[in-house]
Amino acid sequence: MAEFAGKRIVVTGGAGGIGVETVRTLLAHGAHVILVDKDADRLSRARVDLGTARIGTLQSTLDTPQACAEALDSAGAKVAALIHLAGLFERDPFEATDHGVWDRAIAANLTNAYDLAVAFASRYDNRDGPARIVLTSSVAYRRGSAGYPPYAAAKAGLVGLTRSLARRLAPDVLVNAVAPGLIDTRMAAETIAERGEGYKNEIPLKRYGQPAEVASVIRFLCSKDSSYVNGQTITVDGGITNA
């Protein structure tokens, strides 16, 4: 039997590069997946790409606790796993007169993660072992990012949130995070264009990551193979952080 057969999994940011590959691997293992994304056109394209079997979609900005609860309720039943990939990567002008980037970064990367976790705490399915939450940090929380301080701060906050939730929700829910490096997606296109070969050469593997390489780690964290993994942030960056 497919590992996730009969299980409902909600993926926020599900129409993004990593999101689509995450949904693809979950579907391949039998899950019923609900893609949540703010972009209706990209949701439609993702559905065409992935097919319609065992897929639901919801357009949402996840900007209120109610919206986060509705995202989970859209699964139509209790949820075995929540994968929170939705986020905002926006350059910061670092000016006293412009606080908007900070406010948006914290709201769209961190506050909604908290609101989703609160909603999930009364909506999870752990009949076949612990339910799962997987949050998405970034190597920016460790390396810093000169042009994106609010983003780096929000992603660092997600690591602290992961650790706290892992204690609060155990043993019924396992909570972990992934911290991707520079992954070849639309969101990273501008950064890749700016940094070019110089940044690539800093990576021990001498290439940028692919969305499927992050998706495979997320699938592991939702699987029975990760039954004793809790409160961890797994870095997926080709070795640039620690090598």
Image (cartoon, rainbow, N blue to C red):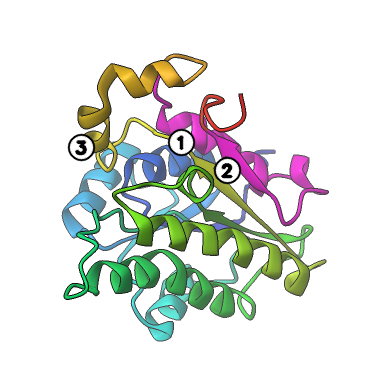
Q: Which residues are magenta?
A: 207-236
What residue lies at 75% left-to-right and 44% top-to-bottom?
Answer: 226
Residue 184 on the magenta segment: no
Name above or below for residue 49 compared with residue 40.
above
Q: Residues within 10 Å of mark 3 (few under 14, many from 20)?
A: few
Image quadrant assignment for residue 63: bottom left
The answer to whether mark 3 and mark 2 are in CB contact below 8 A is no
Q: Quadrant of the C terminus?
A: top right
Between discs 2 and 1, the one toward the N terminus = 1
Q: Give the camera-side residue of 128 and 200.
A: 200
Label 3 amino acid?
Glu
Between discs 1 and 3, the one toward the N terminus = 1
Q: Position of residue 56 (x, y in %)?
A: 38, 58
Asked if one can make out residue 29 in the rendered structure from this viewpoint, the answer is: no
Q: Give the camera-side residue of 46 and 108.
A: 108
Label 1 amino acid?
Gly
The residue labelled by disc 2 is: 218
Camera-nearest label, 3 or 2:
3
Q: Give the camera-side residue of 82 and 176.
A: 176
What residue lies at 61% left-to-right and 30% top-to-bottom?
Answer: 242
The residue labelled by disc 1 is: 181
The residue labelled by disc 3 is: 190
Q: Position of residue 221 (x, y in %)?
A: 66, 45
Camera-nearest label, 2 or 1:
1
- Distance CA(mark 2)–CA(mark 1): 14 Å
Say what secondary structure mark 3 lies in: helix
What residue lies at 33% left-to-right and 30% top-to-bottom?
Answer: 184
- Distance CA(mark 3)–CA(mark 2): 25 Å
Between discs 3 and 2, the one toward the N terminus = 3
